[in-house]
Amino acid sequence: MRKRIAVAVVAALMLISCVPFISGCKAGIRYTLNEDKASYTVKVTGFAGALGGEVVIPAVYGEGDSAFPVTAIANQGFASTNISKITIPKSVKSVGISAFMYCANLREVVFEDGSGVEAIMNGAFAACENLKSVNIPETVKLIYPMAFMGCASLSSVELPEVLERIGYRAFYQTGLEEIVIPASVHDETVPDLDENGEQKKDEDGKLLTVTYMGIGYGAFHSCERLKLAVVNARVETLYAGVFGYCLALEDVYLPQTLKAIEGAKFSDGKLYYGHAFHHDGALKNVYFEGSEEQWAAIEIDNKEYKDKQISTPFDNSDLIEAEKHFNAIYNKA
């Protein structure tokens, strides 16, 4: 009986170990013709882990009458591969959700000059722990949630001047040492529309709206090497956890448009994020673009959760340093 069990176990293990070999334990790159019949989407096929080294996506794929531009990288298109560098041609307009997630060996991402990519999608480069260099295209307007989450080796990044929103946890647990958020980033309130395109109303007939955060919850949370944050963004609220656990953060520059610095966020009794600056023990200076009177008018804590606040309060009387315009202060020259 024991012999039969042993044989069965060995057979099962052989079957499991052979799974990669059924597909040849190889990886290929597939180009799929899009619905327009005039462009391609690219993705890896087969055993993703077998694809390594430097990859250059061609601007055009195919020959003769089948030669069309490569315009998109599929959702999870290169996820979990072992590539070390990816070059993305300017023909690519869309980088899919989780396109390069879990590429542990990826060190460099190059978008070719002239790239027209407008969005870095959810988790596109998440958990690329060795990623050191990425040139975000100048055309990018949206950085979606968790786009660069867990990129522990990413020490610097230049955000484009047309960027409008940074999603929640977009740069969570990255290695950033400083960040400059451009003035183009802003909160936006728009009508809340139903499926017919009509604006929704509440029970009292009041028109409903939806507010999109310029800088989302926990966007730079746990960036433990971050020392400088320049928020040129035209935002009205710094949401919970946006710079939480930035243990090395020393200097922050805030815009005149700011009206609130949010406290801890809870939902159904569960803590999601602490205060916007919770556990930032190294924080020395907060520079505000406006006057002291304007600073005094800013709502520092979220009153709804004030009784539940568990992190160190943000003490504006100790931290505000000067009535100076941070654009003049922040000068590397």
Image: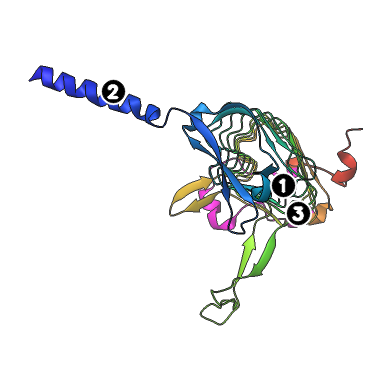
Disc ID at residue 296: 3
What colour scheme was applied to this rendering of the protein?
rainbow
Q: Is 318 included in the stretch rendered in magenta?
A: no
Q: Quadrant of the N terminus?
A: top left
308 relative to 71 in the view: left or right = left
Helix, strand or loop at mark 3: helix
What's the residue type where badge 2 is placed?
Answer: Met
| Quarter location, residue 85 | top right
Q: Is residue 85 visible?
A: yes
Residue 241 picture location, percent across and down: 60, 44
Measuring 39% from the left and 27% from the top, which residue is drawn there? 21
Residue 257 picture location, percent across and down: 78, 57
Q: Find the magenta span and give its range.
A: 295-317
Q: Is residue 323 visible?
A: no
Which residue position holds label 2?
A: 14
Which residue position holds label 1?
A: 91
Sort mark 1 into few (<14), some (14-19) or many (20+) by Cα contacts within 10 Å.
Answer: many
| Quarter location, residue 208 | bottom right
